[in-house]
Amino acid sequence: MVAFEVAVNARRLPDAERAAVLTSPPGFGQVFTDHMVTLRWSRERGWHDGRLEPYGPFTLAPATSVFHYGQAIFEGMKAYRQDGGSIALFRPGANAERFNRSARRLAMPELPVDTFVEAIESLVARDRDWVPEGWGRSLYLRPFMIATQPGLGFTQPSSDYLFCVIASPVAPYFGPAGPRALTVWLCADYVRAAPGGTGAAKAAGNYAAAFVASRQAADEGCDQVVWLDAAEHAWVEEMGGMNLFFVYGGERPRLVTPALTGALLPGVTRDSLLTLARGLGMTAEEGRVSADQWRADCASGALTEVFACGTAAVVAPVGEVRGRTGGWRVGDGRPGPVTRRLHHALLSIQYGRKPDPFDWVHKV
Ligand code: COI
């Protein structure tokens, strides 16, 4: 067990300025709290030097491994201010376990789950004044790990690593009016992940490789890119950095989300929504949906809603699809009732307004 020694207490903003940021947080991940957690790993010493220290820059040699070979992974999670003032994390153990799966895939050291959670708790407890109040607002937490061995050798993974957690108060991702329906671009020119690749890991390089497609989507007037499988370019995998759900509405809605083939990120929100949907009496399955099926089922009216989900945006409805061979609308192009119901059910647990039968909420 590593203790996070408090190096210095920092105050980066006067109370009044912090209060203004919390009332109206600027764009996603633009302002950071007073502190950060750092923890180092070396081949000789294992994990050591845990610190809770003022948020600030690192000094790294230009030859540091991460700059050249991109050994970097991250997580995304949130702390919520519940009614009554208590602060809660959501399934931090699930993020810790995924972090370790990413670490294994990138040949990086694993961090004991308890240490990961303790690091998050230490930062949130110290910077608890930074957790905003209000439905949809939260403190976004970004744990990450980078390779810090200086040198350009490529025969072995780095011998040294830095784990760090930073935190940023955030407003609802799609503004105070709530999620608007997105227009998505079916990406035919690039692939995000291939079998045996790093698609299931939250590796920084996956995101770097996606920017060119996001730019293409924006050029086509779309908000986000939808990735298809690498082999056949037929099967829907993910949207941007989020998982997708297809809703076949009716008396008992049926939800289908792409199965975890190894090329998709196993989202914690995805997993939570599968459980919540079943608890609400819906059918929720992991399966395969092709782009052609998506189009045909929208045309027949069987497929009534599509939404994406992830920690940052929570639930994001998809209203329109565009691609090289034309486009189509999903339902009436607006956020649908199943999407809104699941979004509300999830937030209700996160903000402590509804019972938490799954033991997901972790009070700090
Ligand atoms: C998250 O939802 O936490 C993500 O990691 C998406 C991020 C790239 C903004």
Image (spheres, grey):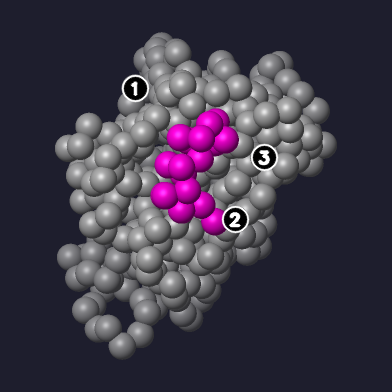
Residue at mark 1: 26
Q: Earlier in the sequence, mark 3 or mark 1?
A: 1
Question: Residue at left 21%, top 79%?
Answer: 152
Question: Residue at left 65%, top 24%?
Answer: 341
Picture layout, residue 354 above or below residue 35: above
Near mark 2 (Cα within 10 A), the count class, few <14, some 14-19 or many ≥20, is few
Residue 15 occupies which quadrant of the picture? top left
Name the residue type under label 3.
Answer: Arg
279 or 361, nearer to the observer: 279
172 or 305, nearer to the observer: 305
Q: Earlier in the sequence, mark 2 or mark 1?
A: 1
Question: Residue at left 37%, top 47%?
Answer: 226
Residue 24 image point, x, y percent: 40, 15
Residue 277 image point, x, y percent: 71, 37
355 or 325, nearer to the observer: 325
> Is residue 219 left or right of 320 when viewed as pictured?
left
Q: Nearer the viewer, mark 3 or mark 1?
A: 3
Q: Is residue 165 visible?
A: no
Residue at mark 3: 254
Near mark 3 (Cα within 10 A), the count class, few <14, some 14-19 or many ≥20, is some
Q: Secondary structure at mark 1?
A: loop
